[in-house]
Amino acid sequence: MKITGRIAAALLTCAALFTTTVGTASAANLDEPRLKDIAMQIVSSAENSSTDWKAQFGYIEDIDDGRGYTAGIIGFCSGTGDMLDLVELYKTKKPGNVLEKYLPALRRVNGTESHSGLDPNYTRDWKTAAKDSVFKAAQESERDRVYFNPAVKQGKADGVRALGQFAYYDAIVVHGDGGDKTSFSNIRKRALGKAKPPSQGGNETTWLNAFMDARVWAMKQEAAHEDVSRIETAQRVWLKAGNFDLKTPLKWKVYGDSFTIN
């Protein structure tokens, strides 16, 4: 059969639709339950030196990064506002809880590294609250609202799969998404100066390398984040291997420690 220009065009359109459908069906997104749990384990390896993220609800300490107390499953900070939001949510879910009395102090220290009004019993009371299923649920809710969901949403919009969505998530966890030059949005903006995401016709590997380069730059702007192993010996390793779907087994190193998810 002679293939006319119109038939050829139709065949090309069908082929494109088939490729798109197959690609969409096979693409792995980080909000799939199994992959979400993997993401939590990887972040916990960097934040808590353990993949057991569910053991971190009661974690709290000042890591001397200028953000006051860092605590919980995603590193809520007394100096950056997310800890305040969390404790306010906890109050709405369980009025009269053990942390509610610290809300005035949390409002005062927001934006600083101060412990004023929190010491000496805040860390003890945080650990007590962390035994409460209501507080645990509040931590997971705020983690998803502030960090996880925005990262996955932007990743899907950019056309990147689970690895790229995780790279975004890890960046928001560490840098937030405020207006400063090292925020997630500005890291992404910096990457856009070097490459395009798949949704704009770019190559996924090239785009993620550009994003990771921009992330490394952002990390090195703060002394507390000068160690970039959570990128170079974890995310970049999977990118070089072409593991865009974060298929297990996963092996990586962060801050000198080795981890595996089978």
Image (tube, rainbow, N blue to C red):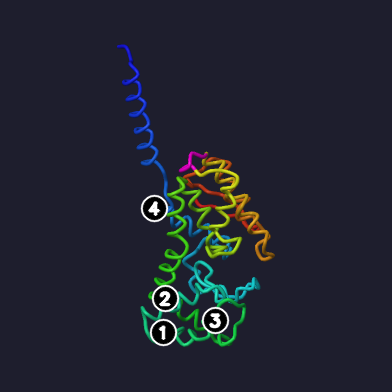
Q: Is residue 200 within the magenta segment?
A: yes
N-term-proximal mark, 3 vs 1: 1
Q: Earlier in the sequence, mark 3 or mark 2?
A: 3
Image position, residue 248 (x, y; %): 48, 47
Residue, disc 2: 135
**Disc 2, SS:** helix
User: What is the distance, in whole Å, between disc 3 and disc 4 at their CAs?
Assistant: 34 Å
Q: Which residues, given as a range, are shown in magenta?
A: 198-202
Q: Is residue 2 left or right of residue 41?
A: left
Secondary structure under the numbered disc 3 in the rendered image: helix
Q: Residue furthest front?
A: 5
Q: Position of residue 177 (x, y in %)?
A: 52, 63
Contact (Cβ within 8 Å) of mark 2 with mark 1: yes
Residue 120 part of the magenta segment: no
Q: Are marks 2 and 4 in contact (CB under 8 Å)?
A: no
User: Looking at the picture, does residue 76 appear above or below residue 226?
Assistant: below
Q: Amino acid at mark 2?
A: Phe
Cβ atoms under marks 3 and 4 closer than 8 Å: no
Image coordinates for residue 52, horizontal then vertical, percent: 50, 63
**Residue at 60 percent of width and 78 percent of height:** 112
Earlier-in-chain disc, 2 versus 4: 4
Residue identified by numbered label 3: 123
Instruction: Find disc 4 in the rendering and name its residue.
Output: 32
Give the quadrant of residue 174. Answer: bottom right
In the rendered image, which residue does mark 1 sit on? 97
| Vertical order, 171 against 98 (above or below) | above
Residue 7 in the image: above or below residue 177: above
What kind of residue is marked 4? Glu
Tell me if mark 1 has few (under 14), some (14-19) or many (20+) residues whose alpha carbon lies within 10 angstroms of its own. Answer: some
Q: Secondary structure at mark 4?
A: loop
Mark closer to the chain start, 3 or 4: 4
